[in-house]
Amino acid sequence: MTSIRISEPRSKLSVTALLLPGKAPENAAFLTAYLATPRVVPAIHAMWTGPEISCPVPAADLEGRAYAQPLPAENATLTPQPGDIVLSYVPPRMWGGNPNAIFDIGLFYGQGARLLFPIGWLAGSVVAQVSSGERDQFAAACGIIRRNGACDITFSLVETSNG
């Protein structure tokens, strides 16, 4: 089974989220291709969606890449739950005329999240989930990120056993 290791040293964020290719195959394939090598992604606490650390994939990581294709909503949600890792895709020119597509990895850590943006409701794909045993540490670290401000989060793929 493939998981995503998510870490940020200042907040002591260090969790593993199980990838859900059976529920979100195209979105999981995007992350698998994108994270074929570990990535450091700028992150900030979201303003509109509630308890979320937003990690927009840098445009430079998308230019000319085969994986940077439009993504369907799979295992879709408008109300992410604690521990959900949500991949959101916004087509070109939809958000303020931005000519580039937006791919955002959302780390949802608390109750009351919603995918309501200035452009309206936008279903995201629950592509991975933090294990229930790590959710308290996940929430605590995300709270530290919220208080400290912008940071860089490292994402990498790991193979995990299912036992």
Image (cartoon, grey):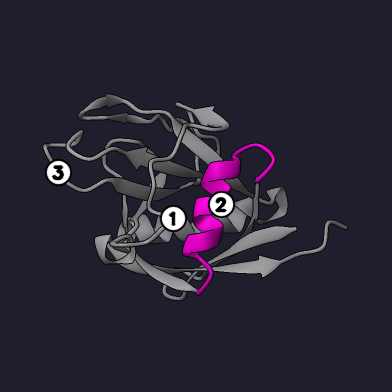
Kind of residue indicated by mark 3: Asn
First in sequence: mark 1 or mark 2? Answer: 2
Q: Are marks 1 and 2 in contact (CB under 8 Å)?
A: yes
- Examine the image and state in which quarter residue 66 appears: bottom left
Q: Which mark is residue 98?
A: 3
User: Which residue lies at the image location 70% right of the left edge and 48% below the top edge?
Assistant: 132
Q: Amino acid at mark 1?
A: Tyr
Q: Secondary structure at mark 3?
A: loop
Q: CA distance from mark 1 to mark 3?
A: 20 Å
Gap in angstroms between the C-alphas marked 1 and 2: 8 Å
* Residue 151 is covered by the magenta coloring: no
Magenta residues span 21-37
Residue 29 location, x and y as percent? Answer: 56, 52
The residue under label 2 is: 29
Q: CA distance from mark 2 to mark 3?
A: 25 Å
User: For the residue labelled by badge 2, is the local secondary structure a helix, a strand or a loop?
Assistant: helix
Q: Position of residue 129 (x, y in %)?
A: 62, 47
Q: Is residue 109 above or below residue 78?
A: below
Q: Is residue 15 left or right of residue 94?
A: right
Q: From this viewpoint, which residue is outermost toward the left? A: 97
- Give the mark nearer the N terminus: 1 vs 3: 1
In which quadrant is the N terminus drawn? bottom right
Position of 146 compared to 32: left or right?
left
Vertical arrangement, residue 163 with respect to residue 78, above or below: below
- Numbered circle sitting on residue 67: 1
At numbered mark 1, what does the secondary structure look like: helix, strand or loop?
Answer: loop
Instruction: Give the mark count.
Output: 3
Q: Reply yes or no: does residue 32 show up in magenta.
A: yes
User: At 88% from the left edge and 58% from the top edge, which residue is drawn?
Assistant: 163
Q: Position of residue 27 (x, y in %)?
A: 52, 45
